[in-house]
Each structure stands twice: as C-alpha cells, then as structure tokens.
Amino acid sequence: DSAIMLFLFDNIVFSDLQHQENPCKLNNVVDKNSMMAESVSVLSPPPRVMATSAASPPALPKSVIFATSGMGGCLGWAIIHPANTLAVRMNLASMEGKVFSLKGMVEKSGWMSVYDGIGAGVLRQVFYASTRFGLFETFRDKLHDYRGKTDFASRVGVGAISGGIAAYISCPCEVAVVRMSNDATLPADQRRNYKGVVDAGTRIVKEEGVAAFWRGSTPFVQRAMLVGVFQVATLDQFKEMYAYRLNQKKNSIPNVFCSAMTSGLIYSIATMPLESSKNRMASQKPDAKTGKLPYNGTLQTIRTVTAQEGFMALYNGFLPYYVRCGGHTVCMFIAVQILRDAYSANQLA
C-alpha cells in the first residue's frame, strides 16, 4: 500500500510540474510570433491608397454638364485661337506652293490678324464642346448603368460617337472659322472679306448654297471621332491612371492638367492629317477653267497631297496645331473642372 501511495504521489507532482511549465512554453511561442509579426509589419510598406475626397460630391445635373462643357470650350478657345490661326495659315500655305513666314504675315496683316475668325471659333465651341463632352458623359453613364462597369473600350466607343455627332452639328461654324482665319493671307482679288460670322454665314448661303457649310464635313467628322477617342476617352482614362500612379486626387487641377497634356499630344499626332484635309476642303475654290473642286474626299485629298507634296506636307503647321490641341485641352478641361467645382461648392453651401 505504501508503495502504491508513493507511485501516485510521484505522478501527481510530475503532472503539476508539466502543467506549470507548459504556459511558459506557450507564452514563449506567442511572444516569438508577435515579435516576428511586428518585424514584418515594420519592414513591409503600407499599401498604396488612391487619393479620394472625404465625401463624394453629388451628381451634377445634365444641364450643368452641358453648360459647363460649352463654357469651358469657349474660354479655352479664346486663349488658343491665335495658335489655330497660325496652324491653318501654315497648313494652307503649302497648298498654294508658298512657304509660310510669321514675319511676312505680321508685316502684311499685323499681329491682330491672328484673331481673325475668333467669333466663329467661339460660336463653334458653343455647339461643339457642349455637345461633344456633354454627350460623352451622358452616354458613358448610361452605358455604365446598363453594363455595370466603365472600361477603356466603352470610353473609346462613346468618345467616337459623341465626337462625330458634335462635329456634324458644328460643321457650318468650322467652315467659317477656316475661311475667316486664312482670308487675310490670300491675294486681294481672292479674298472673301467676310465682315463677321453672321456675314460669312449669310454670304455662304447666297453664293454657294447651304450644302457648302458641310464641305469638308467628312474629314471633320472623322477627325472629331478620333478626337473623341484620343482626347476625351484617353483623358478620362489618364485621370484614373495618374490618380493611382501619382497618388493624385482624381479631378483635381494637377490631375486634369497632367491628363490633358498627355491626351492632347496623342490626339494631335493622330488627327493632323485629317485636320489638313479638312482645311483644304473647306477653303478650296473651283478651278477657273474646269469649274471642278480639287479635293472631293478625305482619302483622295490625302493621296493627292502625298503624291504632289509628300506625306509630311499633311503635318505642316504641326507645332501651332499641338499648341492649339494641347493648349485647348488643358484650358478647356481645367475651366470645366473649376466651373463644376464652383457649382458643387455653391450647392453644398
């Protein structure tokens, strides 16, 4: 009996000692794991978080979207119209076999001639900018509601459609802009001498018919569809990319500026041949002997210019054209964003 009692006592003591040692071992394991977790958390960089506003602003009414788009387009055009005038004159000078000279232009017409046709240019933006950008956002949002997402492919399709519609609507103003911008560089006996955008429109209807307003509409619409893709759609995409890559707040002024400069460069390169074709078709006159127009279509114009002057002739005036495209993209979309921010702030006040 004493032997049995001694055996039971030894087992009880041994089990008690094990019980006392186990918590220490477990605590050591927990301490080591927690130390490892802390070291990993210190060495690992925090996850990147895209900058967002504290509270999402309320959705803008469609009337505000169209109005701010048109106002931003007009403000942007008022700033860069001189660059457009230089681009048109440089481009059309090669059509007449001349070399454009800025000094000669100033001596002949004066510095203020770079503002020739600004009334028609601003009027065009009332229709073109408001329709192009307003329809883009409207169609994009409707497509998002239908598909449940907005990807780059949908932006491309919507941008092309909205750009083409806007161009066709505003084509009469575009014809007036091209003619009035270049009129001062023509010989005195070839000038049309329009007194203003109203006079230009009235005389075009009387002398050439309403159809003349859409002369050159094909390359203009084609160019506008590319602009819708390379300007509006890529701008929307670059906003998201720069917000993530550069940790910018989406739709902030730096975010809009970087996105606009990038999309402006891309669409300038892509659309310059169509711009050249549009300028030539809009400003052409019938041949004095045959009565036929030298250009009758986009591809025919590009082929003719390439054969007679070389393909790079289509890029004559590219630098002022990029200043116009990039500058207008920046000025327009920053102006649009400022106007929309002011509207949103007034609504929240």
Image: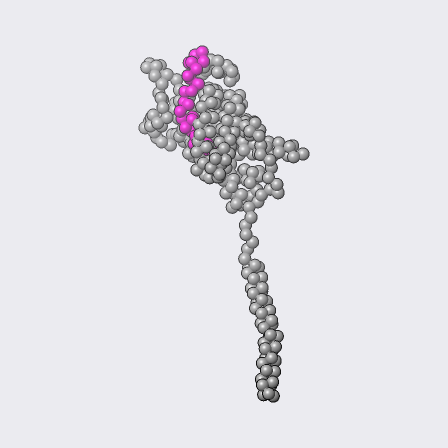
Prevalent SS, magenta region: helix
Q: Report the magenta residues as a range.
A: 205-234
Colouring mode (rainbow / by chain / secondary structure / one colour): one colour
Where, quadrant-wise, is the N terminus in this rendering?
A: bottom right
**Residue 130 in sight from this viewpoint:** yes
The answer to whether 34 appears left or right of 194 in the picture is right
Residue occupying the far bottom of the picture: 2
The answer to whether 36 appears left or right of 90 in the picture is right
Q: Magenta segment: does it hold 197?
A: no
Q: Residue at x 42, y 23 (%)?
A: 217
- 126 w.r.t. 347: above or below: above
Query: In the image, residue 212 lies at what x, y percent?
Result: 42, 17
Which of the two residues, 252 or 115, is positioned nearer the viewer here? 252
The answer to whether 151 appears left or right of 74 in the picture is left
Q: Residue at x 56, y 43 (%)?
A: 248
Residue occupying the far top of the picture: 206
* Picture quadrant where residue 187 is located: top left
- 229 w.r.t. 167: above or below: below
Which of the two residues, 286 or 131, is positioned nearer the viewer here? 131
**Residue 283 in sight from this viewpoint:** no
